[in-house]
Amino acid sequence: MSLNYIWSGFFLVGFAAAFAQWLFLGDTEIFKKVIDGTFDAARMGVMDIALPLAGVMTLWLGIMNIGEKAGVIGWLAKVIAPFFSRIFPEVPKDHPATGHMVMNFSANLLGLDNAATPFGLKAMESLQTLNPNKDEASNAQIMFLVLHTSGLTLIPLAIMAQRAILGAADPSDIFIPCMIATYAATLAGIVAVSIRQRINLFDKVVLAWLGGLTGAIVALIWYFTQFLSKGEIETVSKVVSNLILMSVIAIFLIKAHLRKVNVYEAFIEGAKGGIQTSLTVIPYLVGMLVAISVFRNAGVFGFIVSGFEWIFSSLGLRTDFVPALPTALMKPLSGSGSKAMMIDAMTTYGPDSFVGRLACIFQGSADTTFYIVALYFGSVGIRRTRYAISCGLIADLAGVVTAIGVAYLFFG
């Protein structure tokens, strides 16, 4: 699926939808709304995303460099090498990219987005050194990106916090459904890419690692449900995730000192790349955000949701999940947009309603595919994404379908 056609499609479909609303519904403000949205999106891409990202990148690339010189990143790469050598066969043994990817996935698992992004961009940069065609995504880069867009997160802290703000009786009641949905999305992403790349998923090492991860998630669910009260889940999750991150920094520093590394110089050396990376992604980021803004502000989602409601009602199926669909539809396009949709669903229907809870599960089931493609591939100058977007959307779809299923199971 070509990003060229997708990007153009956002504008052209948005224009058609806006034109229809002006022509048939008499909405004389629709074009102003769309154009104003493009300016807002362009400003947001630079002022609200790229500039804050520069600071975060500067910090975590510096920390990452300390970890590399301390030998911790290399150790992590060796631990997970048997698994990664199967699903990333193009990445040589002990290559730094393996350690960077491990750090990214670990931060994602803990729901620490601010740390995950710098680790992910560093991983993409490392993978680019192995890429023979610099403007086309390699197999390894596609697998990494799809795994990242599937958004495997064990602790949806931000969602639980938002539910608490809006007065949910139990903010953490979506914890297990979110975990199940995001894990389903991740498995679907792995399978989709593996089929395209002819990776043997029945290899005993791959099965052992996937089985171990599944067992760990089941054990975590069991622990949280058996030993913690519902009110304690959010507090424990918040403490544990940030404690682990702080412990990682401490381990990096201690190991570096034991190796006689000048940690401050190592930090400065790594941090220098933060600003440049942020500047590199601005054109890609602004271009994608503006296109998504046109698609959203033209009212396309309203037409899509109405269409879904008509289809399911015509088939005699339940439609009580349809009001939550805007969150699911927005999620691959915009994290802030889907968050706004989630908050709107909880405000309109109540945080403890079926729609409110399902919107939260949608928000936690996957990540922002198009934003991540623009950010990560843009950071290394990749223009031809091959099948990265289609596989990412397959993972998103699996997360959405699973989210609906577990919502009915837990709350229906």
Image (spheres, grey):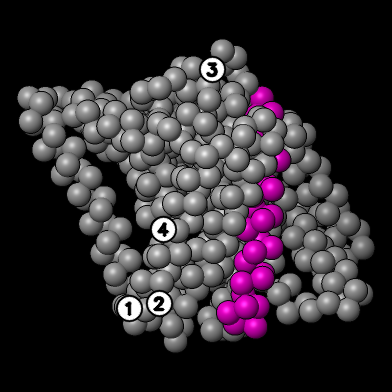
Whichever of callouts 3 and 1 sits on the residue coming sooner in the sequence is 3
Q: Secondary structure at mark 2?
A: helix
On-image quarter of the C terminus: bottom right
Q: Main secondary structure of the magenta part?
A: helix
Circles 2 and 1, Cβ within 8 Å, touching? The answer is: yes
Q: Magenta segment, which residues?
A: 384-412
Circles 4 and 1, Cβ within 8 Å, touching? The answer is: no
Crowding at mark 3 (Cα within 10 Å: few <14, some 14-19, many 20+): some
What's the amino acid at mark 3? Asn
**Distance from the alpha carbon under mark 4 to that under mark 1:** 17 Å
Q: Position of residue 369 (x, y in %)?
A: 60, 45
Q: Is residue 135 above or below residue 322?
A: above
Report the residue marked by disc 1: 228
Residue at image coords 88%, 57%: 20
What's the amino acid at mark 4? Ala
Report the residue marked by disc 4: 216
Whichever of callouts 4 and 3 sits on the residue coming sooner in the sequence is 3
Crowding at mark 1 (Cα within 10 Å: few <14, some 14-19, many 20+): few
Whichever of callouts 2 and 4 sits on the residue coming sooner in the sequence is 4
Whichever of callouts 2 and 3 sits on the residue coming sooner in the sequence is 3
Q: Secondary structure at mark 3?
A: loop
On-image quarter of the N terminus: top right
Residue at image coords 66%, 25%: 384
Q: Residue 62 magenta-drawn?
A: no
The residue lying toward the viewer, choosing from 117 and 40, is: 117
Left or right of 197 in this view: 18 = right
